[in-house]
Image (tube, grey):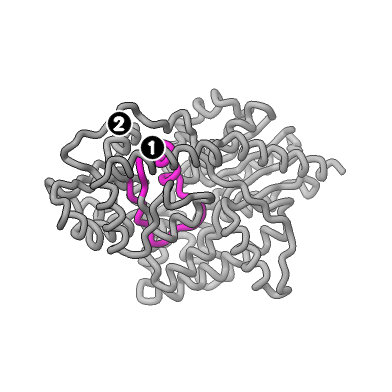
Amino acid sequence: MRVFAVTHRVPYPPNKGEKIRSHGLLVPLASKHEVHLFALAEPASDVAHERALLDAGFASVTLAPIDLRLRKAVSALFVATPLPLTLPAFFSPTLAAKIALAARSAKPDVAVLESSSTLPYAEMLPRNVRWLMDLVDVDSAKWDAYAKGDGSVTEHARAIVHVVAEAKRLVFRREGATLAAVERRIVSRAFATLVTTEREAALLRDVCRSGARGETSGRIEVVPNGVDTVKFAPVTPPAHDARPRRIVFFGAMDYDANVDAARWFADAVLPRVRERAPDVVFVIAGSNPAPEVRSLARTGEIEVTGFLEDIRPTVQSALVCVAPLRVARGVQNKILEAMAMGVPVVTTVAAAGGVEGHTPESLRVAEDASAMAEAVLALLADEGARTRQAAAARKLVVARYGWAPRAAKLESLLEEAAAASRA
């Protein structure tokens, strides 16, 4: 097959959510088929990864740098239109022109695109070319949650807030509604629409039923996230020392859901833990920590690492990993990676919902700050409990979350779509 793949981030290095997923799905595909990659380079320095992607097996790589701050400012001009602001924010005329030109010369059999923000690129493909859309999560539901005040705003919201700060909930509600309309359009036009969990699939069907026709038209498929279980493997013996005892939370620390999670744990959970375990240090690990995260650093209590070339030693040095996300959809890669490394995880109900097949033996789930503190303290106090949970977590991830079966499902769907394109 000749496949066009369009992603709204460069899928390299695979060190954060959307990059991990697109890398895990597309690199195996590129090893077996002719895959031409088109991606937005944000930050613009990501264009430096072209060689690595070609070496990974892509037939060609086209990267278009964008200035996301500028694009968000431009998107604010669309507030009075029915268009979601994320679409103009992630639209590059340069990339659009290159996709259109390549489609005329290379004649793709099929295409796969990632994120609702890539819909404009899908709609410029030749009419006979079927395409799949990987929504990953139902973003309209995230915006609805922000409008209700359930957590912090996403990175896409920053430009909106400074334009209409006094009416931000109205803007969030507007974004949720307009994105829902785009999601309905995608489901009706794509050969298949992909999401990460059955929960997201059910939610997307509800979004489609809420449209004017009151019915779901289109095919929705679940392709869960995965984890590299070889790269993320336990260390024997464990890498942590007896003291100081460490609790770790890791991720991109300029992503507002992570910022909110770090602040909530530091303010509402950690004091309860340190009342009974005063030697514990909370480590916040990840790139580009926002000022709100950096301000949490306190000697002997909270450590903020900033960017780490390799996150694994820091996670493996901890007795417990926490994922205190109050707004979360789909599968959280950070949870899967920690579980794969044999580090026991305590998380929220919102974040645990995407980890299918988990049990209390493999993942501890807390409904509020008090319950999360108790779960963390129980693990800190019981080495046997940590060992048992680590083993159960690793077993679950290996059995359910390897990338190979996910990539195989994507390949099968694309072959089916390519056949329909030829018919």
The single residue placed furthest to the top in the displayed view is: 55
User: Which residue type does callout 1 highlight?
Assistant: Gly
In-image side of 170 versus 279 (left or right): right
Residue 44 can be seen in this image: no
In which quadrant of the rendered view does residue 418 lie?
top right
Towards the viewer: 260 or 291? 260
Q: Secondary structure at mark 1?
A: loop
Q: Residues within 10 Å of mark 2 (few under 14, many from 20)?
A: some
Quadrant of image for the N terminus: top right
Place of residue 89 in the rendered image (x, y in percent of width and height, measured from the top left): 50, 56
In which quadrant of the rendered view does residue 306 lie?
top left
Place of residue 93 in the rendered image (x, y in percent of width and height, measured from the top left): 57, 49
In magenta, the rendered stretch is 321-345
On screen, residue 63 above or below 191: above
Towards the viewer: 154 or 251? 251
The residue depicted at 28 percent of the width and 41 percent of the height is: 383
Residue 76 is one of the magenta-drawn residues: no
Q: Secondary structure at mark 2?
A: loop
In-image side of 65 versus 282 (left or right): right
On screen, residue 338 above or below 366: above
Q: What residue did someone put label 1 on?
A: 342
Labelled pair 1, 2 in contact (Cβ < 8 Å): yes
In-image side of 351 versus 87 (left or right): left
Query: Upstream in the sequence, badge 1 or badge 2?
Result: 2
Place of residue 249 in the rendered image (x, y in percent of width and height, measured from the top left): 31, 47
The residue depicted at 16 percent of the width and 38 percent of the height is: 243
User: Which residue type does callout 2 highlight?
Assistant: Pro
In-image side of 224 versus 152 (left or right): right
Q: What residue did someone put label 2 on?
A: 238
Residue 333 is one of the magenta-drawn residues: yes
